[in-house]
Amino acid sequence: MTDHAVSTTTRQVLLVVVFAVQLVLMLPSLVAHPHGPAAWFAYCLLTAVLGIVAGHVATGTPTPPLLAVVPLAASVLVTTALPAGASLDDPDWGFGLVGWYLLLVLVERPKALVVALGVHICLSIAWFAHAGNGDVGTAGVVILSGTSFQVGVLVITRVLHRDARLAAEAAAEHDAARTREELARQREQDLKAGFEGQLGALLPLLADLADEQVSVADPTTRLRCSVAAVQLRRLFAENDDVPDPLLHELTACVDVAERRGVVVSLAVSGTATPVPTEVRRELVAPMAQALAVAHGRAKVSLLRTADEVRVAVVADAPETLPAPGRPVAVTVETSVHGGLVRSEARWRTA
Amino acid sequence: MADGVTAVLVDDHPVVRAGVAHWLSTADVHLVASGEDPEVAWTGPGAAADVVVLDLHLNSVTPATAELRRLVEDGRRVIVYSMRSDDEIALQCLEIGALSYLTKAEGADHLVQAVKAAARGQSYTPPALAGALAGDRSETRPALSPRETEVLVEWFQSESKEFVAQRLNITLSTVNSHLERIRVKYAAIGRQAPTKAALVARAIQDGLIGLDDL
């Protein structure tokens, strides 16, 4: 239950309580004892307040705190209109009722309520003392029973409010934790899906090897293995947190080729520029393919000019390179001259 | 000493000095002096050598650009020989007036060609330097034609002029003259140096480049 719901319910309950107290408890007391017109006027004033608060509760708007002036005025009227010695005794129908009214109007403002109740009680006690002939014992019981009830209700309301707030905070914290958990799960799934998508030639190759449909003795299979090795090595490098990711991925591919015995030279020119991951994949792919099938020597170069990033490879390699997929963002050009394969991927930064 | 080219080498590593001496001797270039102190290029037989091969990092982290400037201002033909493939330093050395910038990762062939070209007062652009020129983003860089840029990039990528010639369907000498024109354009910018002025004057005399191109 939220703070707002607690407030609404409290006001509704108080409204019913006040209505019941006014009609069932106080009206008979008012009728049973002889009272002047001032008492009846006060009764009407309080009934009007009941009507106004009921209106505010019905529309869900907050009760204006200044309305508390009316019950206080009624308190003055009722108390001063009482016959001598009747104060804080049976005929004092107004003492308890005004307290309930103050509670009804000021339940959301505990400090103001305590002050208003204090004023009301002090006024009654003062009038009691002024008349001088009342029974102190009865008066004490009336004050204690009336106010303790009202203060009790106030305390319960505050406790309910606090609990509602704590519950709301706990719920919010729980929701936030759920969201974080969901995000982490989603991210992991995305990463996994991305990996599966990028694994390319690897999964079919592993399946073929497991099913013994291909043999590593076959040069074609070995070629597929080296292509998959370069792809995998590049994929591992892709998510590393490094200042120059493109160069990092190129170096990773060069590393795999060198392990295979290819003599690779890597030349870099120009300063690092940010390249999106998708574009990096496409830029590196043709060169990775060429390195995977290269034998002997290869030269890899990375050139970054003001408006272009160019990754090129010139290698001793079979004339037919495996297709590197269909690039979207980059232009790939592959050609063969004098036994050397040259493959270049270009990406315009601007 | 068939063509009588002499060179002096300033490098702080004995093994580099021995290696370079061997490479040059097999290519008919006489290394008349070598040492770790730049003074070998100013005194004794080194003072008269045609070409100075200067290591840019002599026992220090700061590049010896001041030494390069002193040699260039004296009219010496200098090849910078560095272990670092740093584009910015390479371009700075060209701006000062070095005829070539070679990284130690580049082999004997490039060093010999650079020394021979320098002895004739000509520039030599090895692949790494071509890459630095192609990636040059400085505001003062000269305007290169699309063909010149393509030659630079292809040479950087393949390290083979024959391959560049085949790729672009031009002759080997056209590849070389494109590279030469690019270097002349670079020589025409920045501070004045005798070697740079000679490079430009020669190119205009040979009809390699017109005044309008500069």
Image (spheres, coloured by chain):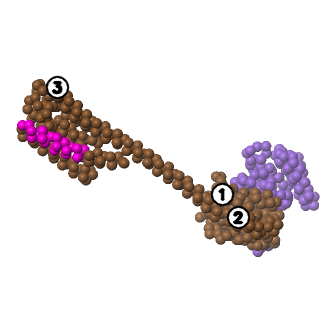
Chain colours: A brown, B purple
Q: Chain of mark 2?
A: A
User: Which of the 4 image quarters holds residue B156?
Assistant: bottom right
From the viewer's perspective, tell me whether residue A214 is left or right of residue A42: right
Numbered mark located on residue A136 in the image: 3
Disc 3 on helix, strand or loop? helix
* Callout 1 amino acid: Glu
In front of the other: B177 or A112: A112
Q: Dot 3 surroundings within 10 Å: few (below 14), some, or many (20 or more)?
A: some
If the image is split into quadrants, where does the C terminus of chain B sit? bottom right
In front of the other: B124 or A80: A80
Residue bounds of the magenta highlight:
A14-34
Labels 3 and 1 share a subunit: yes
* Callout 3 amino acid: Val
Disc 1 on helix, strand or loop? helix
From the viewer's perspective, tell me whether residue A156 is left or right of residue B31: left
In front of the other: B148 or A124: A124
Residue under pointer 2: A202
* Callout 2 amino acid: Leu
Residue under pointer 1: A238
